[in-house]
Amino acid sequence: MANGIKYTNFYHEQRETAELLKKHMIAAGLSTEGQVTDGTECLDCEIGPLLKARAERIAKQEADWAASHNLR
């Protein structure tokens, strides 16, 4: 996330923090390769609750559809 993440229509990046985290992760034996963000890191930001509510609504719609078609 410190390497950069886009949320709430802004791109946020903390290069110094990313380097410090990487240094400590390597020292602790943790991999820093392939670290990616998927947008769910900001569930506390103003858009996070909206995204969570949308995901829950879609999951309910899918479950309701599956139940109505005897798929579960």
Image (cartoon, grey):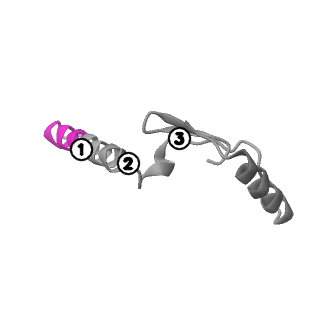
Q: CA distance from mark 3 to mark 2?
A: 12 Å
The residue carrying mark 3 is 38
Secondary element type, mark 1:
helix
Horizontally, is 60 left or right of 22 in the view? left
**Amino acid type at image mark 3:** Asp
Question: Any magenta on residue 5?
Answer: no
Compared with residue 22, is residue 59 higher up or lower down, i.e. above or below?
A: above
Q: CA distance from mark 1 to mark 2?
A: 14 Å
- Residue situated furthest bottom in the rendering: 28
Mark before the other along the chain sequence, 3 or 2:
3
The residue carrying mark 1 is 57
**Amino acid type at image mark 2:** Gly
The residue carrying mark 2 is 48
- In this rendered view, identify the residue nearer to me: 4 or 41: 4
The image shows residue 26 at horizontal and vertical percentages of 83, 58
- Mark 1 crowdedness (10 Å alpha carbons): few <14, some 14-19, many ≥20: few
Compared with residue 54, is residue 21 higher up or lower down, i.e. above or below?
A: below
Residue at position x 47%, y 47% in the image: 40
Front position among marks 1 and 2: 2
Front position among marks 3 and 2: 2
The image shows residue 56 at horizontal and vertical percentages of 28, 48
Q: Which residues are magenta?
A: 60-69
Question: Any magenta on residue 65?
Answer: yes
**Amino acid type at image mark 1:** Arg
Confirm or deny contact between disc 1 and disc 2 (CB under 8 A).
Answer: no
Mark before the other along the chain sequence, 1 or 3:
3
Q: Main secondary structure of the magenta part?
A: helix
Horizontally, is 32 left or right of 57 in the view? right
